[in-house]
Amino acid sequence: MNTPCPPFDAARPDGENPSAHQTLEQDGRLCPGKTYTIPARQGRAMRLRKGEVLSVINRDGSQIGDFWAFADGDCNEYLSMEHLRPTLRRISPRPGDALVTNRRRPILTMVEDTSPGVHDTLVASCDIHRYAQLGHRGYHDNCTDNLRMALAAIGLRPTSVPCPLNLWMNTPVVEGGAMEWRPPVSAKGDHVLFRAEMDAVVVISCCPMDLLPINGEDAQPRSLDVLLHREQA
């Protein structure tokens, strides 16, 4: 007899790592001017006040960052790739672009990008089912669970798992409509700068993918750094 599956809960992770209980600062409020490290394979949540600016730094040059933003106080409003693409009329944001929510309101502005600007807006965050498709057996750290755990660590529960902005992920659509999984073209120390256009909660997961070369030719997940500025740089 088949055991019935429990009701789906968007906030319930399928496993656990330190993302569930470790935070960068209490309640996710970063100290301006201090560099924080998000460990490899893990995720962290941080709160931004309107007007604050966040640098996301690719310290080793090859690490992908799954990036989400939610309206502070309402996880039902979030940075939405489905709404961003038609707003920009492009599939990837550039400096100066407003990044909009599922209510088509600007939540962030991409202020600066020192990398070649190759980011992905098409691919859902990895989860246990994706790793099973790729042949992995047993639990594998994944960005979907990192999002759930990072929000829970600051007392929040998502009602859905939006598609992230995949920073530095190089998955071009090529001739015939196929997608390819390529290493990043970013370099050591490249950063992307975001300004908050409303009070927001940002979550970043250092993607733990080690079965495809999206985190470099060696498929080795690494950490990312973040730095908060009070005013636009």
Image: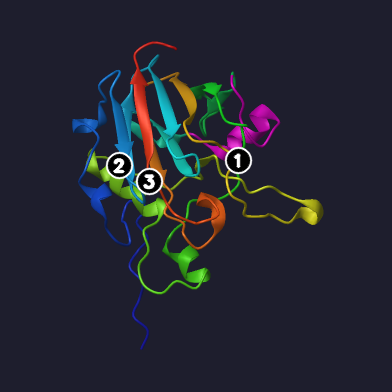
Q: CA distance from mark 3 to mark 2?
A: 11 Å
The image's mark for residue 159 is 3
Label 2 or label 1, whichever comes before in sequence order: 2
Residue 83 sits inside the magenta stretch? yes
Q: Which one is closest to the eye, mark 2 or mark 1? A: 1
Q: CA distance from mark 3 to mark 1?
A: 34 Å
Query: Viewed as shown, does residue 131 lie left or right of 181?
Result: left
The image's mark for residue 151 is 2
Q: Disc 3 on helix, strand or loop? A: loop
Badge 1 is on which residue? 185
- Residue span colored magenta: 79-95
Quick check: marks 3 and 1 in contact, CB under 8 Å? no
Q: Amino acid at mark 2?
A: Leu
Q: Which one is closest to the eye, mark 3 or mark 1? A: 1
Query: Label 2 neighbourhood size at 10 Å, few (<14), some (14-19), many (20+)?
Result: many
Query: Label 3 neighbourhood size at 10 Å, few (<14), some (14-19), many (20+)?
Result: some
